[in-house]
């Protein structure tokens, strides 16, 4: 297991370095001079020079990239041009809101998908199965930027049950989590159903029934425990979708997380903030994928033993 | 007298009785018809705006209501379908061509190029979903072709990985080995034997890619970083809804979103049906 973890960590190094270089290089994709794009045409030459120096743009490109990598290694992501604060501090301030939202959405997705997937597999072909699979097919196709406004229209404006926006009471988490978690719930319920259908055909299920186990025990303890293994991978892979879903959801619900910070940074051409946000989103994605692999290898030894 | 069907005929025979495929094809056909027939189907000239009609609800005059500038939403939707489909088709063509080309080379020749390409794919895949497209569009500046480039920049990776995987397995099959033993050139092997064998999963992948590109493009437009054109895309129209109080004009949020949802779902249904029909085990 230690060798497997070491191998996986080693494979992360080139990818992480590549991500870092792309993020560092982003500022060079700004058409023309990035300093002109930030300050506008009417800024004085002194202001332009000092900003160019602050962003490290007065150095040759390879040196800029090396300096950025060194700074990131020290935890220094530069300073925000608008908030006049270190980017790391801004990211740390905004991160809890996004993480909370992602966890709530994941819980919503699991709470919907597991019962739905299990029931539709057990009652395959029934009307419940048809309803569940219609949800699974349509849920994946519902864009977050449509579902969010629809939920606000129904639950906040028409019924007045839930607050429209802003993070505060526990009720304020419901609509953003539903908005972000629905697509994942749809994908997971389909996956759970397929995985359960396969498992229910296995010999050990027949054996469990023959032993006289109750149907509930057969389904939950024998079938679901085995069928849930592939879900770990899907949840890990989908976490990235959840994270980027936060960019849109936070915009709709005025949620003060990393997604809104990214959009604010883009809108104000605050490139250090944009770079910082992109770096955090991609690193979290890489980290979650690593954790998913490690979790999966713990429960299924064939993964870590394969060459 | 019954005649033996070739593989394409067999697939078509399965597809033409598949309700999911037929439903998806109908919706896609209708969307294409609306996009191409926009000048004849629209009841108002494009760009005509009456401020008094600003945010008016659907009615006999404006069937789908009006937007924040008083333009007829049905007219914008019809012309917007052109842009949405054009961007989606162009992006998928670009990312599919690049991904297929690189995946073919990487899987066929393997070696250092394969290792390098797969590391690059890993790096690009570390930018999940809309993130890379959003950042590139925002930094370079939103325009129709920036959006195409930005989405294709992240879209080619999944195609390359899929094609490479397929090629690795196909190149070891007997018919490819036999052709190589008969002296076939690499070019002939790739284009006559390997590429046709990977086309089936590629067709399914293209269908799903089309639906995901439509969602990403609409998402970018919603955030204000979409294709900046004289015509609003469906996502751009939905983005207008976020600038006004929702209770003032609920139709502005409901109608374009419903169109995006219907088109994406129909493409997903087609993709599912194609996957089933092209699966040799079915």
Image (spheres, rainbow, N blue to C red):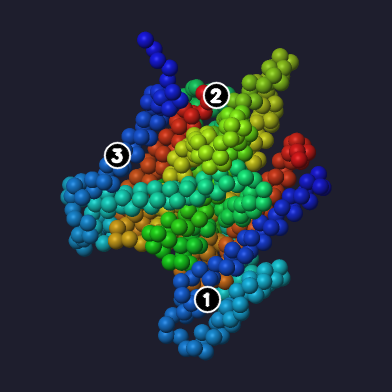
Read off the chain for label 3: B
Question: For the view shown, which residue lies furthest in the top direction?
Answer: B1
Q: Write down the residue under mark 1.
A: A82
Whether residue A143 is situated above or below residue B197 in the rendered picture: below
Q: Which mark is residue B68?
A: none
Task: Please tell me whether mark 2 sits on a helix, a strand or a loop.
Answer: loop
Q: Write down the residue under mark 3.
A: B30
Is B210 on the left or on the right of A192, as rendered?
left
Q: Residue at x 51, y 84 (%)?
A: A48
Q: Position of residue A257 (x, y in %)?
A: 55, 61
Q: Residues within 10 Å of mark 1 (few under 14, many from 20)?
A: some
Pick whichever, A271 or B85, lies toward us.
B85
Nearer the observer: mark 3 or 1; the answer is 3
Q: Earlier in the sequence, mark 2 or mark 3?
A: 3
Is A296 on the left or on the right of B137, as rendered?
right
Quadrant of the image containing the N terminus of chain B: top left
Q: Write down the residue under mark 2.
A: B281
């Amino acid at each position: 297991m230690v060798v497997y973890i070491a191998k996986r960590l080693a494979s992360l190094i080139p990818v992480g370095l590549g991500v870092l270089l792309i993020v560092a290089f982003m500022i060079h994709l700004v058409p023309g001079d990035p300093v002109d794009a930030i300050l506008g045409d009417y800024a004085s030459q002194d202001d332009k020079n000092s900003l160019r120096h602050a962003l490290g743009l007065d150095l040759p490109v390879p040196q800029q990239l090396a300096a950025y990598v060194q700074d990131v290694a020290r935890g220094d992501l530069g300073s925000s041009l608008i908030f006049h604060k270190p980017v790391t501090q801004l990211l740390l301030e905004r991160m809890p809101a996004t993480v909370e939202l992602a966890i709530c959405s994941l819980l919503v997705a699991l709470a919907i998908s597991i019962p739905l997937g299990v029931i539709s597999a057990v009652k395959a072909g029934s009307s419940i199965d048809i309803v569940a699979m219609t949800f699974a097919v349509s849920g994946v196709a519902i864009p977050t930027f449509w579902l969010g406004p629809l939920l606000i229209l129904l639950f906040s404006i028409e019924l007045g049950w839930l607050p429209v926006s802003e993070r505060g009471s526990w009720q304020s988490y419901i609509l953003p989590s539903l908005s972000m978690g629905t697509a994942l719930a749809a994908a997971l319920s389909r996956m759970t159903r397929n995985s359960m259908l396969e498992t229910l055909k296995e010999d050990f299920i027949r054996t469990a029934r023959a032993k006289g186990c109750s149907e509930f025990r057969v389904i939950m303890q024998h079938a679901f425990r085995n069928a849930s293994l592939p879900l770990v991978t899907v949840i890990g892979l989908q976490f990235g979708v959840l994270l980027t879903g936060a960019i849109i959801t936070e915009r709709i619900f005025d949620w003060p997380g990393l997604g809104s910070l990214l959009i604010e940074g883009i809108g104000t051409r605050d490139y250090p903030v944009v770079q910082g946000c992109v770096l955090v989103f991609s690193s979290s994605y890489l980290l979650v994928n690593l954790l998913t692999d490690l979790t999966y290898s713990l429960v299924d030894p064939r993964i870590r033993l394969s060459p | 007298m019954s005649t033996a069907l070739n593989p394409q005929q067999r697939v078509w025979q399965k597809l033409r009785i598949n309700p999911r495929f037929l439903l998806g094809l109908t919706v896609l056909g209708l969307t294409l018809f609306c996009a191409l027939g926009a000048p004849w189907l629209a009841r108002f000239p494009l760009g005509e705006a009456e401020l008094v009609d600003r945010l008016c609800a659907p009615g006999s005059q404006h069937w789908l209501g009006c937007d924040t500038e008083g333009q007829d939403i049905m007219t914008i939707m019809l012309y917007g379908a052109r842009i949405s489909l054009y961007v989606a088709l162009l992006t998928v063509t670009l990312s599919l061509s690049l991904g297929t080309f690189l995946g073919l080379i990487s899987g066929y020749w393997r070696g250092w190029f394969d290792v390098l390409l797969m590391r690059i794919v890993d790096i690009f895949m570390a930018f999940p979903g809309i993130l890379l497209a959003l950042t590139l569009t925002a930094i370079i500046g939103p325009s129709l072709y920036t959006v195409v480039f930005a989405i294709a920049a992240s879209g080619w990776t999944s195609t390359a990985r899929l094609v490479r995987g397929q090629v690795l397995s196909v190149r070891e099959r007997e018919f490819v080995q036999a052709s190589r033993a008969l002296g076939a050139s690499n070019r002939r092997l790739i284009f006559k034997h390997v590429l046709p064998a990977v086309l089936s999963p590629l067709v399914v992948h293209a269908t799903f890619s089309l639906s995901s590109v439509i969602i990403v493009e609409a998402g970018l437009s919603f955030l204000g970083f979409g294709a900046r054109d004289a015509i609003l895309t469906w996502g751009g129209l939905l983005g207008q809804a976020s600038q006004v109080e929702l209770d003032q004009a609920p139709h502005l949020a409901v109608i374009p979103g419903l169109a995006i949802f219907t088109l994406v779902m129909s493409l997903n249904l087609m993709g599912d049906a194609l996957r089933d029909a092209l699966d040799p085990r079915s």
